[in-house]
Image: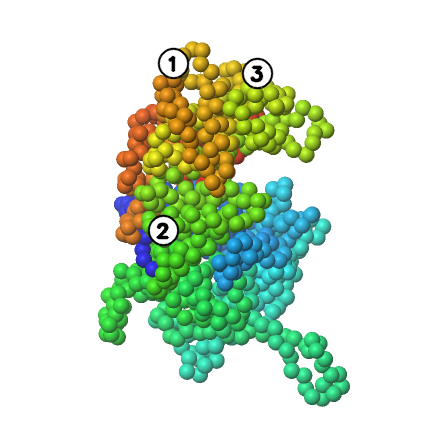
């Protein structure tokens, strides 16, 4: 493990961010991190309980929320989509936060619930029934269905038709369980019930879910001499009211309390966690004293109940009829450790059975099998989640390895050490975020090899497997990029494409844009492939435009055949290889292309981009030997060239209806038919590349004709996406970066960005809306948003209200075309 970056607060004279007690943080599947601080105002002498949300790529751009909680915040919990956040406090108030206008740096409180005056100690969203299992032993299989299998898992509660009902469950300090359900009409149904008839104090609790749709709650009163209690909670809706039923499950005592040598050594239970939200059969316990801790892992098993011989003679037990009971058994325990200050559990759903320690040891180098323990001496240990054996160790600045016992005593006497008060592992377990007792945020890399020496092929295999997992689930893959070195990029992109091509056609279509976005993120990390980033983003834009324009086509008659007008267009254009655009048009039913004049005019900017892009590609064909030039990969991409050819045909037909919607070219001859010329050259190039496994080289005649294009038409400047100002490109040399909340570092660019200055607008030059293709001027007055992943910029509010434009904007209203999150930009962006 090593530190990637740290981010801390600026110290101000009158107000300061200080760590809250308890300090909590949460990490979403979209790589958003939420954590709490208390804002101390020395003039008013009061505390404001703050929630801070940031994306890991721009940690300095933190969005701070005055939570409105009167008491200290005790819990933070992201939902399964990573777009909503729950917060709960010590006064029993629960608030649900959602993005404003789908912006990652703008949040608002939408709904909430409360148990007046009863502090919340555990909180969770209800399970939606979606569970995926990773089969590490099948990581070499070709089919994604073998590597990642869907597990039969019932939602906590379902609506009519089996749709999972949204809501949350919380446990209070007095032993109450409260459930809030979000109805489709926006109303909140809340119900509260006691966990058992005899209520008792609950100092620690955690929540997990079973495959049958039930909920399991584990509680402790904080004393190691008391049992850890477990309860089954069933939620239902009866007569429009939420109903809660509870049942007591088998309990356990920690092993250290039954050991005569340690009976009174660890008086307090400080951490109680299920190993996973959907794994109610395994629990992690930590007992501590003032200086040390011990950690135990327990598993719930079904065991046969032995029957006395007397009863055996009366009613013999045959086969599977032997009575079974549930019993907690200890899996593993640590020796005496330094005092544990925080625990972080893995989120990867790796399929390991309760007793499968042999498989666990065989795959012990795979990320996701380890959980993190932070200690008061500032160190962090990654231990195996079943055997609790140490896999990796990180020593903080205050936790240098002491050589003897006297050094430990001197270290403790010097004052409180800096240590993590809250920790979270990323969703692939390749990164760890920690908030220390000074309020500083630290981002740690966790090596896929867990500190052991693995060959390059094994490391690539681990990273590839996790990239495939993110591709299938839709999770953000920023934490994987932390470990990709420039010499790995080419191999990863090629192997990722090979694995993608092995899948069936239906799955390839579902994942088609996601893999392009993933390739773009990888290519950004190497100077040899950074030019291809522009190509991948242009391909995403082209796919989106093609789908939008084809969706506007309507069949002339209602009783149409199975194929849509867009599908027939693709089929006819692939069959008819004529280089004359008008001869291709004759074979189409032009009545299917009739649209309103206002609709056609509103699409002119997108149509212009298609025309400009075709002209740019053809003009760059003579320079095809230079892979550094953006657009190079399109010259061998038969599918993309075919897509451009189809769009040229559609645009030609629309131009007959409304000539003003056609792309505008600056030609040297007034009589030249520019569309016809470009279509002819594009078709010749497409014919060379349509057989993708064995493309042929363009002939000299085509290259000569493309060489003449600059003398016939003015070649436009293509507005490529700006080089993203995120942090990932600065982390390649593995040097620690120190950041400050609220202050962006200097412009983060690639070391070879000077090669592409001709394709990127310099600061002070006119800016452009990359998705609407509108010019914003040198100093835009409209509010804009940018993508956290690719840096794409677009206006926050739409200037056009036509139906076709709304349909186009709906494709990226929630996420960028690359899948990244949107964040609001200041008006004076550069």
In this rendering, which labeled residue sits more in front, label 3 or label 1? 1
The percent position of residue 79, horizontal first and vertical second, equals: 52, 50
530 or 318, nearer to the observer: 530
The percent position of residue 420, horizontal first and vertical second, equals: 35, 59
Identify the mark at residue 522; answer none if there is no mark. none
Residue drawn at x 24%, y 74% is 404
Q: Is residue 423 visible?
A: no
Local SS, label 3: helix
47 or 577, nearer to the observer: 577
- Residue placed under numbered mark 2 in the picture: 488
Disc 1: CA contacts within 10 A as few (<14), some (14-19) or many (>=20): few
**Residue 389 position (above or below residue 79):** below
Residue drawn at x 51%, y 47% is 501
Identify the mark at residue 668; answer none if there is no mark. 1
The percent position of residue 486, horizontal first and vertical second, equals: 33, 48
Disc 2: CA contacts within 10 A as few (<14), some (14-19) or many (>=20): some
Report the quarter where the C terminus lies. top left
Q: Are marks 3 and 1 in contact (CB under 8 Å)?
A: no
811 or 412, nearer to the observer: 811
Local SS, label 2: helix
Local SS, label 1: loop
377 or 506, nearer to the observer: 506
**Residue 489 position (above or below residue 724):** below
Give the CA separation, mark 3 to mark 2: 51 Å
The percent position of residue 440, horizontal first and vertical second, equals: 33, 53
**Residue 589 position (above or below residue 400):** above
Give the CA separation, mark 3 to mark 1: 25 Å
Q: Is residue 328 visible?
A: yes
Q: Earlier in the sequence, mark 3 or mark 2?
A: 2
């Amino acid at each position: 493990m090593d530190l990637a970056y740290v981010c801390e607060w600026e110290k101000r004279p009158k107000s300061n961010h200080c760590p809250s007690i308890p300090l909590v943080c949460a990490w979403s599947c979209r790589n958003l991190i939420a954590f709490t601080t208390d804002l101390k105002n020395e003039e008013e002498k009061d505390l404001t309980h703050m929630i801070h949300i940031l994306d890991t790529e721009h940690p300095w751009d933190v969005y701070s929320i005055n939570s409105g909680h009167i008491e200290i915040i005790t819990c933070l919990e992201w939902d399964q989509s990573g777009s909503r956040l729950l917060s709960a406090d010590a006064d029993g108030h629960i608030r649900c936060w959602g993005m404003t206008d789908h912006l990652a740096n703008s949040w608002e409180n939408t709904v909430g619930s409360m148990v007046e005056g009863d502090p919340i100690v555990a909180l969770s969203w209800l399970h939606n029934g979606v569970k995926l299992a990773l089969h590490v032993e099948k990581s070499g299989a070709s089919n994604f269905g073998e590597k990642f299998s869907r597990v039969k898992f019932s939602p906590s509660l379902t609506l009519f038709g089996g749709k999972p009902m949204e809501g949350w469950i919380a446990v209070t300090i007095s032993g109450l369980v409260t459930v809030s359900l979000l109805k489709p009409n926006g109303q909140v149904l809340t119900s509260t019930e006691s966990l058992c008839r005899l209520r008792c104090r609950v100092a620690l609790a955690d929540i997990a879910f079973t495959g049958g749709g039930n909920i399991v709650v584990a509680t402790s009163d904080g004393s190691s001499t008391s049992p850890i209690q477990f309860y089954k909670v069933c939620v239902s809706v009866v007569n429009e009211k939420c109903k809660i039923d509870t049942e007591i499950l088998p309990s356990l005592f920690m092993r250290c309390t039954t050991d005569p040598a340690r009976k009174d050594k660890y008086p307090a239970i400080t951490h109680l966690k299920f190993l996973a939200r959907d794994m109610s059969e395994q629990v992690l316990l930590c007992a501590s004293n003032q200086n040390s801790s011990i950690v135990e892992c327990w598993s719930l098993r079904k065991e046969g109940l032995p029957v006395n011989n007397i009863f055996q003679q009366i009613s013999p037990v045959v086969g599977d009829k032997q009575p079974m009971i549930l019993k907690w058994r200890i899996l593993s325990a640590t020796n005496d450790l330094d005092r544990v200050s925080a625990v972080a559990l893995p989120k990867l759903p790796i399929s390991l059975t309760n007793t499968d320690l042999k498989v666990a040891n065989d795959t012990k180098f795979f990320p996701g099998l380890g959980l993190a323990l932070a200690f008061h001496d500032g160190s962090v240990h990654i231990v195996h989640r079943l055997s609790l054996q140490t896999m990796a160790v990180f020593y903080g600045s205050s936790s240098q390895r002491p050589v003897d016992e006297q050094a430990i005593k001197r270290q403790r006497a010097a004052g409180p050490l800096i240590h993590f008060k809250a920790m979270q592992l990323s969703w692939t377990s390749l990164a760890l975020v920690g908030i220390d007792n000074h309020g500083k945020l630290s981002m740690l890399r966790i090596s896929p090899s867990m500190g052991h020496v693995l060959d390059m092929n094994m490391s690539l295999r681990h990273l590839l497997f996790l990239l495939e997992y993110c591709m299938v689930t839709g999770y953000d893959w920023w934490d994987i990029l932390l470990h990709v070195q420039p010499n790995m990029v080419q191999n990863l992109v090629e192997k990722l494409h090979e694995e993608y091509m092995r899948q069936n056609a239906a799955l390839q279509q579902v994942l088609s844009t996601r893999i392009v976005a993933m390739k773009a993120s990888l290519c950004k990390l190497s100077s040899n492939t950074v030019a291809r980033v522009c190509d991948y983003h242009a391909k995403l834009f082209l796919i989106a435009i093609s789908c939008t324009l084809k969706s506007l086509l309507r069949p002339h008659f209602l009783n149409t055949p199975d194929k849509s007008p867009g599908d027939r267009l693709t089929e006819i254009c692939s069959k008819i290889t004529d280089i004359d655009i008008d001869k291709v048009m004759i074979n189409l039913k032009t009545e299917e292309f009739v649209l309103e004049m206002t609709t056609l005019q509103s699409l002119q900017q997108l149509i212009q981009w298609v025309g400009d892009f075709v002209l740019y590609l053809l003009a760059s064909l003579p320079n095809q030997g230079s892979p550094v030039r953006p657009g190079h990969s399109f010259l061998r991409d038969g599918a993309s060239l075919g897509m451009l050819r189809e769009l040229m045909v559609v645009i030609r037909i629309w131009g007959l209806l409304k000539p003003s919607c056609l792309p505008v070219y600056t030609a040297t001859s007034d009589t030249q038919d520019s569309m016809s010329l470009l279509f002819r050259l594009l078709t010749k190039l497409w014919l060379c590349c349509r057989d993708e496994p064995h493309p042929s080289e363009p002939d000299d005649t085509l290259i000569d004709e493309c060489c003449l294009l600059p003398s016939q038409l003015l070649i436009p400047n293509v507005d490529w996406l700006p080089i993203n100002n995120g942090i990932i490109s600065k982390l390649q040399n593995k040097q620690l970066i120190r950041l400050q909340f609220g202050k962006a570092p200097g412009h983060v660019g690639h070391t070879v960005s000077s090669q592409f200055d001709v394709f990127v607008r310099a600061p002070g030059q006119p800016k452009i809306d990359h998705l609407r293709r509108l010019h914003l001027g040198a100093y835009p007055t409209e509010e804009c948003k940018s993508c956290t992943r690719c840096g794409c910029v677009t206006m926050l509010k739409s200037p056009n209200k036509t139906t076709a434009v709304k349909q186009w904007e709906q494709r990226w209203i929630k996420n960028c075309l690359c899948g990244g999150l949107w964040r609001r930009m200041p008006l004076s962006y550069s």
